Image: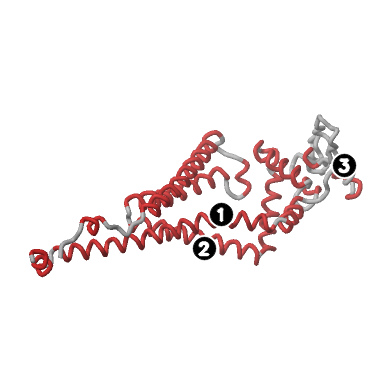
Amino acid sequence: MARTKSDEEFTFVSPVVKYLLFFFNMIFWVIALILISIGVYSRIVKHETALACLSVDPALILMIVGILMFFITFCGCVGSLRENICLLQTFCIILTIIFLLQLVAGILGFVFSDKARGKVTEMVDNAIEHYRDDIDLQNLIDYGQKQFNCCGGISYVDWSKNMYFNCSKENPSRERCSVPFSCCLLSKEETVINTMCGHGVQRLDYLEASAFINTNGCIDKVVNWIHSNLFLLGGIALGLAIPQLVGILLSQILINQIQDQIKLQNYNQQHRSDPWMKQSRKN
């Protein structure tokens, strides 16, 4: 019984799955390089940043995420191209662990929402305290207050936690008892922003201050926005989860195909060295 050439060239490994997984990882590999570059550039340009008061330096977060993505996608790219089961299993296991950690973090954040709110409040208070220490932090806070029409963490008087806006008599700053201009109520007709529009408003009570600034705190505003946009946030979470699930599925399919191919090669090798098989071929 002679073997045909098509039998020898048959493979269980699908080129579609193989190269689809390769290009899938290549895209995220490039994204990882971009994240690492941005993080390194940020650290070089600004050796120390007040944004670090937000618990962790964002530049450091970008570098860590980029390096992790680089390692994972490297395993996926090389593993799929070289049909290496070890690298593919590493890729699949790490992606599965990350997916499960994200799922657990989401559940814990929902269950322990009060503790999460307390941690966010602490971070916001810390950011307010360092408002004037870094232009990037300042722009971030101003952007958030303008987008959500809010002022401070819990209320506008939180700005007393900043040494420049503090209402104490010992404060020599010209901004004493004021709030940033991003708290102010601006009409559409105003073309030039008055940066002193929040001057002295901390001396006013809630109703009086509401005529000049947004008096509601940003934390409540953000929480209300989250509650009213649960479907949008769910869509974003699903959008982040789908690439991970696709990567896990493709890598597992390719691993199974490679294992089947190895079994086929072992079978062929075994029968090539089988003397009874050789005798049957001669006959």
Identify residue type, mark 3: Phe
How much space separates mark 2 and mark 1, taking CA atoms? 13 Å
| Label 2 sits on residue | 100
CB atoms of marks 3 and 2 within 8 Å: no
What numbered label is drawn on residue 212? Answer: 3
**Numbered disc in front, either 3 or 1:** 1
The kind of secondary structure element at disc 1 is helix
Q: Furthest-right residue in view?
A: 208
Of marks 2 and 1, which one's residue comes earlier in the chain? 2
Q: Depth check: 53 or 236 in front?
A: 236
What numbered label is drawn on residue 192? Answer: none
Q: Which of the 4 quarters of the picture holds residue 258?
A: bottom left
How much space separates mark 3 and mark 2, taking CA atoms? 47 Å
| Label 1 sits on residue | 240
44 lies above or below 15: above
Identify residue type, mark 1: Leu
